[in-house]
Each structure stands twice: as C-alpha cells, then as structure tokens.
Amino acid sequence: FQVVTTGNPVLDYETMPKRFDLQIFVEDTTGRTDLNILTVQVTDKNERPVFRGNMAIQTVTIYVLEGTPPECIYQVDAADPENAELKYSLLPASVPFLVLESGAIFSTKEFDYEKDPHCYFLNITVTDPDGLNSTKTVNINIININDERPYFTTRQRIYRIPEEQSPGTIVANITAKDPDDEDSPSRLFYSIQSSEGYFSINPSTGVLQVTGRIDRDALPLWLHPNVSVIVRVEDSPSSGHTSELEITIIIDDINDNPPECNPSTFRKEANENTTAGTFLLDLRNYCKDIDVDPSNNRFNFTGLSGFGSNNFALESAVSGRLVMTESIDLENPANLGIEVYSLTVRVQDTARPNYSNIIYIYIRIKPVNEFFPVFSNLSYEFNVLEITRVGSSIGRVNARDKDWPPSVITYSIVAGGGTRDYRNIFWISPTKGDVKILARLDYETTQKHILTVQASDQEKTATASVTVSVLEVNDEEPVCSPNFYSFQIPVSLAVGTNVNGFRIECQDRDSDPRSFRYFINEGNVNNHFTFSPSAGSNVSRLILASRFDYDSGLDTNWIYRLRVYITDDNLLSARDKTTHLIKTGTVTLSIRVIPNPTTVIATTPGFTVVTKRENLYSESAWYVPFVITLGGLLLLGLLGYLGFLLMTWVRTRCPLAGKADSASL
C-alpha cells in the first residue's frame, strides 16, 4: 500500500499542519485489528498558526484499544507562521482526555468497551499569543478487543432420550454468547470434550445430536445409563477464550429386544407309558430378555402347537414348565409308528410391540420292552433226508413280540441237537431263525432230534420245541467180509466147485439182506467165475463156472484179479431202479491158477495163503495215532526217570573205587 498526497488542497505551512500522523488501521476478515502511525512532516513557513498534519486537512479519527492504560494517544501538531508559542485546549472538559501544552492528547483512564462509550468527539483548540485560534475535531473510537469469555445461555443441564435413536436425532440446542460481540452476532465455535462416541455437536450452531448407536442393553450403558457430555465454546478457532458446560443425558430403556432362548431347540426323551403330569422341561431356565427395564424384559410362553401337542401342556404362561397330559403307548394303533413329537412354543414380550421368538421342542418317546417274544408255533417239526448236504437249511422258526417299534429278535439253540460224536449238529441263524445242519445226519444212528430254540429281544425270552425227523435214504454201501482175498487153485478144478471154499458175507445198515445182488465187473476173463446165489442173500459163494483151457490157447492168464460188485437193488423193480438211490460195495479177489497140479507132492497137504485187510479205525479218527504217540513218549519219559533214580541209588550205596579204607558194604 502507498500513501500519497491528493493535491487538493495543496499543502501549505501556514494553513496546514506541519506534519501529518497517519494512523494505519488494519482489519482482517475475522475481525482482528491492528494500528500503527505513519508521520508525514511538512516544512514550516513563517505564516499564521495553523494545524498541521492530519488535522489540517481532515477530521482525525483515533482508535484506542480497550484495556489500554492511560497514555498519549495523539500529538496535535499546530504551528504559528511567526513561530509564536501556542496553547492547546479541548472541549468538552468532561471527557476522560486531556491535552498538554505540547499538544499531546492523553487518555486519563483504561477503557472497557463493554461499559464505556464506544466513541468520543474532542474539539481541540490551538491559540497563539494574540488570541487567534483554530479548532479541529478529533474523533476517538474505543476498539473492542477479545478480552471476555463467552458464556452459555442454555440453562438446562439434564436431558432424557430413548435408546436406539437414529443418527441425526437432535438431543439439545446449546447456545452461548460472547460479551465482546454485543453489537454483532457472536462468532462462536462449539465442540464436545467427551461423549463416548454417542453424540456430536455442530461447531457453528451448537446443535447436539446422535451420531452412534445407543444400546441401553449393552455395556457400559447397561451399568451406567447416564452419559456425561462436556460442551466447550470458544470465541476463536485457536488461542481464544473458552467456557465449558457439563450436561447429563439419561438413556431410557425401550422394549427393543425379543426374548431369546439358548438353546432354541430342545431334544428330550420320555419313556412310553409315562404317567400324565410328568414334568419334562422348564423353558424359563433357558430364556431371557436382555432389556434392562423390568417392564420391558417380562415374557410369557404361549401357543403350544405341533404334531401330538395334545399329549403335552404348559403349566402356565409364566412358568414355562412343559408337562405330559396323557400317557403315550406306542403299541396303541393311534400312536403306531410315532416316536418323535415335534412341538413349537412361542416366547413373547408382555410389553409392546410384543416381540417374540419360536422354541422348537422334539420329544422322543423311548420304547419300553413290555412284551415277551411269541413263536408262531409252540413246536416245529422238520423232516430231513439223511443225505441232506451239510450247511443246508432244513426249516425256519419265527417269533415276534408286540412291542413297537418291533424288537430285534435273536435266535439260539439252548438244548438238544447233539450226538455222541458231535456236540452240535444243528445251527440256527441268530437273525433269521433258519435252522441248518452242521454235520451229516445218519438215520441208522439217530432217527429224531429234539431241539429247544430260544427267541430273545435282549431282555425277555421265549422257547419253542423243534423236532427234526431224519428220513431214511439208501445211503449206506454194502460192506462185505472179507473185502479182499488172495488164493491159488489148480488148473484142473472141476466146474461147479466152490472155489477154495470161499464165500463172502455182506451187511447193509439200511437194506434188507435179500436186497443184495452179486456180479463180477472186472477181471473175469472168459467168465470162468460166478457167485451163487447171485442175488437175494447176504451170503454168496464163489463158483467155478467153466473149465480152464490153456492147451488150445483160449486161456492165457494165470492170475485173475476179480473186482466183485455187490449192489442193494435186488428188491427194486426196473422202474424203481431209475428213481431210487443204489449203493454198491466192492470186493477184490486175486486168484492164481497153478498150471501143473501133478507136480504137487501127494503127501504134502495143500494150503492157501489168505490176506485179509480191515480198517481198524475210521480215517477221521485222527486222535488215535496222536494218543498212541503221546502214550509212547510218556512211557519213554517214565523209563528214563526210573533209570535216573536207579543210578542215583547205586551211587549212594556203592563205594568209590580206590578207597581201601572205606567200610565194607
């Protein structure tokens, strides 16, 4: 900025001040001010006294900051062209200012803008020795400075709001004033020192509003529902005067939470036939409403519904105790197949808006084993061929009980079914009741087996009798004695002769002695041999049927190995032979023909070597050689032990060799 002369009027020493003190007053947009003085000196001319400086050309305005102590606030500059001594005076005399002989204007007090006048008009008169004078007016403005604290005009200190107010909800309108701004609207700045994030304040208007969620039912409001907010007001964004106001906002509880149950699904069990009135579940122990106010956290249990809900009831809406109203029998056709009852109960606030939740209850009725298993028959009879294959099923038993759901029945044989050789020759399927054979049946040994079969449902049992009748089948081979024979005959033996007096005797445990039929199947070259009788008897003889003819070359074999077949079909018709089981026994004969019987010494009696082989025990009797071997080892051990005892006795009784002085025995 530049200060220039205007040229109107032209500076004149006699008529104008000799110097100009220019007060530079500066003010920014926020109202802050400053003051400084620029002095312009005019060269004196010897003319009549005149005001110089600013007072020569304008009315001087002087700015005095309030609170400034008494001091010189302006120097009046006047001159006399003759350079005479001048005198200064001011009017009115009542103002708190004075002017000295030197023209200096002093303030006589410390001004307070808020109490004193804001403007003074001083008439300054300068007088020369001849009494000529000039008067100029000086305006003095008291400048307001920021020296006062703002103060709150809001009187209310306690506010109440319900919880869960939406952001932006106005809680209070905080107002304040600044004494320094009485003539203009206050420019104040509001802020919150502490609100725990629930509230904010408009920095310009002081409107306090909700910014965060306010949940009365959560910590810390659950314990301390009063929120203390300290509001600060400043008259400058920085380094200004401040005031603080503490207000209390009480958060009121509302019914904003439904009752909650943990868990919300229950699974209970009750035995069937449980008596009516039996307590099952106390729902109140699992439910709560987190609303703080007791009027908002009360709830009732209502609306029991669901499949089978007529069997259950709530003692009261308040208690929430679930009880049975009827005894449930699973075997009752009305309940058949129903094991789980699905119920729902509504838990609802008593206060509006009556929030509610649904509780799901599943009650399983546990079956009770009330009934014994019952067999479909008191006794069973099975007919089985004695040749039935081992492992075959020969029949089935079946048992049920009236319990629902149907019990798992297991079957077992508790008595019978054994023989001399086998402890158990029958087996029953534990789950299906199929009876199977574990060993070969023998009609000739046992014709009937009586078993006791038990059915169990794991708690209760029942028994039934099973009779297994073994049906006879021709399953036994004819057994002949001897079954092997070896002998010699002369070549000249007469036809029709019982060869060497040989005969076989046969037995069949399941055939009549008359059922045997004899024929030579192998080795009977030229049919020299036959049996008589050939059928109808259990005893038959070997007969020479035709003579030997070695001379003509018809016969060439001197040793005949005959394989004799004995069948048990003699009494069967030709038709029955195609359908009935036929068994065959065998006998092996070795016959040596002596070619020249004349070489035999007459005085020496003839003899026949007979070899007979018989099985002494069954091949399945594996224990026989085991027992014999074990017995032999035990015998050897016993003999060794006896030998050891004998040697010990001899050593103790007989003297050692070489000891002549030992006592005689």
Image (spheres, rainbow, N blue to C red):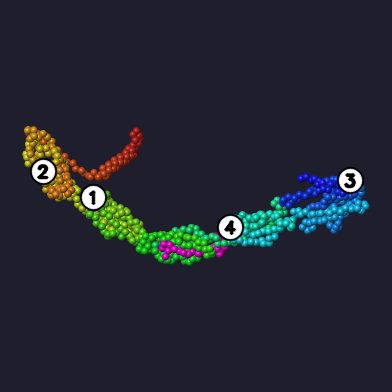
Which contiguous range is marked in magenta? Answer: 290-310
Residues at badges 3 and 4 in contact (C-beta under 8 Å)?
no
In this rendering, position of residue 542 left or right of residue 95: left
Above or below, 665 relative to 6: above
Disc 4, SS: loop
Instruction: Indicate which label's residue lies in the foreground, 4 or 1.
Output: 4
User: Residue 280 falls in which quadrant of the image?
Assistant: bottom left
Lower position in the chain sequence, tag 3 or tag 4: 3
Q: Which residue in the structure is indicated by mark 3?
A: 45
Amino acid tagged 4: Ser
Q: Position of residue 510 (x, y in %)?
A: 17, 50
Measure the alpha-carbon separation of dots 4 and 1: 92 Å
Secondary structure beneath dot 1 equals loop
Q: Is residue 467 above or below residue 625?
A: below
User: To which residue does mark 4 refer?
Assistant: 166
Residue 307 is left or right of residue 195, and the answer is left
Choose the circle earlier in sequence order: 4 or 2: 4
Nearer-N-terminus badge (4/1):
4
> Tag 2, which secondary structure?
strand
Q: Residue furthest right?
A: 130
Disc on the earlier residue, 3 or 2: 3
Q: Secondary structure at mark 3?
A: loop
Query: Mark 1 and mark 2: span between their CA atoms?
Result: 35 Å
Dot 1: within a 10 Å radius of its alpha carbon, few (fewer than 14), some, or many (20 or more) residues? Answer: some
Q: Residue at x 60, y 57 (%)?
A: 168
**The disc label shown at residue 531, or none:** 2
